[in-house]
Amino acid sequence: MAEAQVATVFAVDDDESFLTAIGRVLRMGGYAVETVPSATAFLERPPSEVLGCVLVDLLMPDMTGLEFHARLRAAGWSQPALFLSGQGTIPATTQALKGGALDFLTKPVRSEDLLRAVGEAVDRHRMILETNGELAALNARYQSLTPREREVCLGVARGQLNKQIAYDLNLTLATIKFHRARGLIKLGVNSVPELVLLLDRIGVLDTPIGPVSQR
């Protein structure tokens, strides 16, 4: 049986003593911990898809936690963010949560509250990674189609009959049926509703198609 993946908590704070204390609590809770002394130092590293979350102080010398969170998302980090500060205010809390932060904790935070919030954040990130993996697999199937198979499958998903697709693409009905069958097999779907759901999920349902003569 494969071992469960150990989640990593990235703790970003300019208070070294706080990082030491919080790291001790998190490690006792079963998490790997990476402590970073500044927001700038953290953002210098490339995004990682390791399971975990980011624990960040609201007020730091180089930038606010809210600015850090915006840059974190823009850089491609998918881990949920938890804000932790001794100077939290209601407006800051509201802005943080609206910006996509998962929770807002106030220093000093009880160990049980911290571990609860981190556990929820890790569970959220696990779901994000699973969803991203599923979408990547679906995209890989779509990319395996030939350009013609894509055009035919898109036409089918949009409710067109085989003869309509044949007319639009200036092809024979037999050719359309061939590409349709091959496309459905490659995509791993058995019906038109399944095809529609797959193409809509990966965001290609509105891709333009047209006859070869217009290419």
Image (spheres, grey):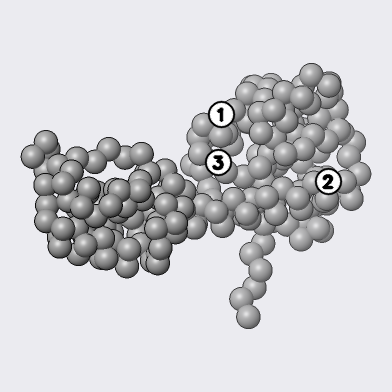
Estimate how packed mark 1 is, as few (under 14), some (14 to 19) or many (20 or more) residues with alpha carbons within 10 Å.
Answer: some
- Relative depth, front residue between 104 and 111: 104
- How far apart marks 2 and 3 lie (CA) works out to 21 Å
Return the x and y of residue 210 as percentages of the image width and height.
Answer: 19, 40
Q: Total label count? A: 3
- How far apart marks 1 and 2 lie (CA) works out to 24 Å
Return the x and y of residue 11 as percentages of the image width and height.
Answer: 70, 42
Quadrant showing the N terminus: bottom right
Would residue 127 be found to the left or right of residue 90 on screen?
left
Q: Amino acid at mark 1?
A: Arg
**Residue drawn where x is 68% and y is 39% of the image:** 81
Estimate how packed mark 2 is, as few (under 14), some (14 to 19) or many (20 or more) residues with alpha carbons within 10 Å.
Answer: some
- How far apart marks 3 and 1 lie (CA) works out to 9 Å
Q: Secondary structure at mark 1?
A: helix
Q: Amino acid at mark 3?
A: Trp
- Relative depth, front residue between 210 and 79: 210
Question: Which residue is under mark 3?
Answer: 77
**Residue drawn where x is 27% and y is 65% of the image:** 181
Would residue 1 be found to the left or right of residue 97 on screen?
left
